[in-house]
């Protein structure tokens, strides 16, 4: 072993020795919170264990410096953070000999674990002590006392001592671990750096882990860029043999190439279109677009001989085949081959010119191009207005333009210009337009100056001169030979065959039929009032609903129904009026029978409260009670074969059902044990019949007397009829009472 290594081990050992030899530091009571369980003796509460006072002056009962809690009890001291604790000292009372520490237990815990039992290193009747070697991370200290011969667990003070502060760069128990913080110390328990930044080449919470391969520097946050993916130095990032990966440079290969450079050692220049930056590693340009004069995948190769410019796609045109500049295309001494011009000889001679420097004029007349090199006219084409083999003769009168193939269309046969075709008086004959009257009117127009509009069916094109339509069919709203006349008032549409239906006979649009005030006469609808109301509607705006029998369709104008038959619940000439109150159904011929005279639905007859008056039933209260039942909902049994449907009195029935007997015209229950003699029952039946006969005679007599009285009393006919009817109704229930005679005698 070398002397240097021996010296280094000696220094480390010495530092560890002086570190572990340092005295522990008491944790201030202000960093401790106290909780407890157990009833205190008088005012000797658990808070006294960290009040900083001990029992050294007389009776502990009166010093106010101790805590006394009735067993079983415990006291817990919670620290403000986790400390590396070396020693815990529990002080008791000193004013006598006590067994105060019998059955007490020490408990220690961290934030991430529950309290665990810990043995006292030393304990007597005055104090108890535990020394933790090596120091241990502690967040909570507890002392518990179980039941013993002493009633109270007495503790005057609990002192907790932590490990002395480590020198910078160390942490943990006895400062045995290293941390590599960029500046300042690390946390004594976990080693976390206070400034959260590690020294170059280190990482982790305690900055005690070296960088992963491929990273270096502060918190290992920098990436290595070494040639062939070699690993760089974890601290400074230098690469083996100082060789950087393509696209990187600098001492530690951490700086990318300048925007216009790429490759190994950034030694190659980019050649991208419009000076764009290339890929610093490969040299590839955005969109693979090279600057003019360069090619290949990374634009690093100049164009071949004879071509230049973007994508090396332009041929050189230099005199005598000289080589041009691969970027600009410029020729030596700026001399172009015949037929070419501009500084890089990339443009053909302008129209009408040819030869070296484009200095010779074509012998072709204007409008016809010649070969830019030889000057030959293409296909012997002359400029408009000219003809003959050398294009020297103007067109004949009445003709103009290319090859003299266009006819003049001037008003009254006036002459036109042989080149342009323009008329001398600038007036075209009907059906023609444009400055030289060579263009027929646009589709949809005709006549002089093309000022007339076509009105042909289905937007067909009319004749551009006279405006006639194909098969003489006009568009909707138009008529006449050339469809130029609008429909007469009151008509519209195709062939003017549709009639207007506007309110009060107002006029409609001759094309669409739309009314000027947008109001249709009754029975018609749609935007042009041409459509009769939908089935089941009629009248103004088709806003009225038909109410015809069997859903028949009503007349769309006045709403009348076939054979004038309305649907149930409706009446009037056009069935538009609901039945009067108290009536319903077909022809409003059915009466309502609702409780207390409430109204029923005019169509179905259903009562609003769904309750019938007594004596009626069914969903619309239209059916009288079946024989043998009466009253509300016909739910009451009258106990005879036929009874009055309202009050239940037996009508025309002389005998009640078994178990019932006749009393005052009603069948009431009776006990058969009271009258079991068959002779008695026969006698009772005979007497009942006789009673009915007598009662009928008496009622008939009374009716005759009152009827005659009604004939002479000075009442209206209606009053008399009402009174007589009421008289009959009042007596009707009584007329079947077999005891009615006795009733009259008594009254």
Image (spheres, rainbow, N blue to C red):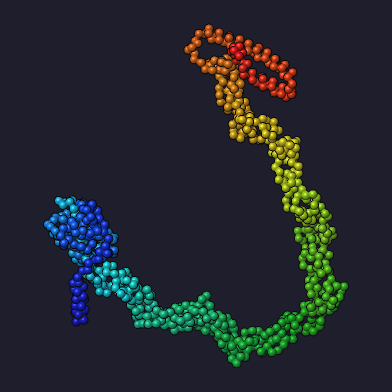
Q: Is residue 413 left or right of residue 475?
A: right
Question: Where 349 falls versus 416 (above or below)?
Answer: below
Residue, x 69% and y 34% (percent of image)? 580
Question: 65 or 151: nearer the eye?
Answer: 65
Q: Choose top left, top right, bottom left or bottom right for residue 623.
A: top right
Q: Is residue 636 left or right of residue 55?
A: right
Question: Where 697 falls versus 115 (above or below)?
Answer: above
Question: 694 or 67: nearer the eye?
Answer: 67
Question: 236 or 103: nearer the eye?
Answer: 103
- Residue 112 in percent (x, y) is at 29, 60
| Residue 9 visible in the current orientation | no
Q: Is residue 658 left or right of residue 338?
A: left
| Residue 173 visible in the current orientation | yes
- Residue 359 in percent (x, y) is at 69, 89
How many marks can you see? 0
- Residue 556 in percent (x, y) is at 74, 43
Question: 118 or 700: nearer the eye?
Answer: 700
User: The N terminus lies in which quarter of the figure?
Assistant: bottom left
User: The C terminus lies in which quarter of the figure?
Assistant: top right
Q: Choose top left, top right, bottom left or bottom right for residue 187.
A: bottom left
Residue, x 19% and y 79% (percent of image)? 6
Question: Where 657 falls versus 184 (above or below)?
Answer: above
Residue, x 55% and y 8% (percent of image)? 683
Residue, x 75% and y 36% (percent of image)? 564
């Amino acid at each position: 072993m070398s002397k240097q290594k021996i010296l280094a081990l000696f220094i480390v050992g010495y530092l560890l020795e002086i570190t572990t030899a340092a005295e522990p530091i008491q944790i201030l009571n202000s960093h401790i919170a106290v909780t407890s369980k157990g009833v205190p003796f008088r005012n000797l509460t658990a808070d006294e264990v960290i009040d900083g006072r001990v029992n050294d002056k007389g009776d502990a009962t009166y010093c106010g410096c101790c805590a006394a809690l009735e067993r079983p009890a415990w006291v817990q001291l919670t620290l403000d953070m986790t400390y590396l604790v070396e020693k815990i000292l529990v002080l008791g009372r000193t004013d006598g000999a006590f067994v105060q520490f019998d059955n007490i237990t020490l408990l220690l815990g961290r934030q991430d674990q529950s309290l665990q039992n810990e043995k006292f290193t030393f304990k007597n009747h005055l104090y108890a002590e535990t020394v933790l070697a090596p120091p241990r991370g502690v967040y909570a200290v507890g002392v518990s006392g179980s039941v013993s011969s002493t009633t109270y667990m007495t503790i005057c003070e609990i002192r907790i001592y932590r490990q002395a502060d480590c020198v910078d760069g160390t942490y943990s128990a006895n400062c045995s671990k290293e941390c590599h913080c960029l500046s300042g110390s690390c946390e004594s328990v976990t080693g976390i750096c206070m400034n959260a930044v590690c020294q170059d080449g280190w990482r982790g919470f305690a900055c005690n882990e070296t960088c992963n391969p491929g990273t270096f520097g502060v918190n290992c946050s920098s990436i290595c860029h070494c040639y062939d993916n070699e690993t760089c130095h974890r601290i400074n990032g230098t690469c083996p043999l100082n060789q950087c990966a393509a696209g990187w440079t600098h001492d530690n290969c951490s700086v990318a190439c300048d925007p216009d450079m790429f490759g190994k050692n950034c030694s190659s220049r980019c050649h991208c279109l419009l000076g764009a930056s290339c890929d610093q590693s490969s040299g590839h340009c955005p969109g693979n677009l090279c600057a003019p004069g360069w090619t290949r995948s990374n634009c690093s190769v100049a164009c071949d001989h004879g071509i230049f410019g973007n994508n090396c796609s332009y041929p050189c045109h230099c005199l005598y085949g000289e080589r041009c500049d691969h970027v600009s295309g410029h020729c030596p001494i700026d001399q172009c081959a015949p037929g070419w011009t501009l500084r890089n000889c990339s443009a053909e001679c302008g129209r009408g010119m040819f030869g070296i420097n484009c200095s010779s004029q074509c012998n072709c007349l204007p409008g016809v191009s010649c070969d830019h090199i030889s000057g030959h006219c293409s296909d012997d084409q002359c400029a408009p207005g000219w003809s003959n083999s050398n294009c020297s003769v103007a067109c004949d009168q009445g003709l103009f333009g290319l090859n003299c193939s266009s006819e003049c269309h001037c008003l009254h046969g006036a002459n036109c210009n042989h080149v342009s075709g323009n008329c001398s008086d600038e007036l075209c004959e009907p059906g023609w337009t444009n400055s030289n009257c060579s263009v027929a009117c646009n589709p949809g127009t005709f006549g002089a100056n093309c000022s007339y509009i076509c009105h042909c069916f289905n937007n067909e094109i009319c004749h551009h001169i006279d405006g006639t339509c194909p098969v003489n069919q006009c568009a909707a709203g138009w008529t006449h030979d050339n469809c130029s006349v609008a429909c007469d008032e009151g008509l519209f549409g195709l062939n003017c065959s549709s009639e207007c239906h506007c309110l009060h006979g107002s006029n409609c649009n001759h094309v669409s039929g739309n009314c000027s005030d947008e109001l249709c006469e009754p029975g018609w609808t749609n935007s042009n009032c041409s459509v009769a109301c939908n089935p089941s509607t009629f009248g103004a705006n088709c806003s009225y609903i038909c109410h015809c029998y069997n859903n028949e369709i009503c007349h769309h104008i006045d709403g009348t129904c076939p054979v004038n038959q309305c649907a149930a619940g409706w009446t009037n000439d056009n069935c538009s009026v609901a039945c009067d109150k108290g009536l319903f159904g077909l022809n409003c011929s059915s009466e309502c029978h609702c409780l207390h005279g409430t109204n029923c639905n005019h169509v179905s007859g259903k009562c609003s409260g769904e309750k019938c008056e007594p004596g009626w039933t069914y969903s619309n209260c239209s059916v009288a009670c079946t024989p043998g039942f009466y009253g509300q909902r016909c739910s009451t049994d009258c106990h005879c074969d036929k009874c009055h449907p309202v009050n239940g009195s037996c009508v025309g029935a002389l005998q009640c059902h078994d178990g019932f007997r006749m009393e005052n015209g009603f069948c009431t229950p009776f006990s058969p044990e009271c009258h079991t003699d068959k002779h008695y029952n026969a006698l009772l039946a005979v007497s009942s019949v006789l009673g009915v006969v007598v009662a009928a005679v008496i009622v008939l007599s009374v009716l005759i007397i009152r009827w005659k009285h009604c004939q002479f009393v000075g009442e209206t006919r209606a009053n008399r009829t009402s009174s007589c009817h009421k008289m009959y109704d009042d007596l009707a229930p009584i007329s079947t009472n077999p005891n009615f005679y006795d009733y009259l005698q008594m009254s």
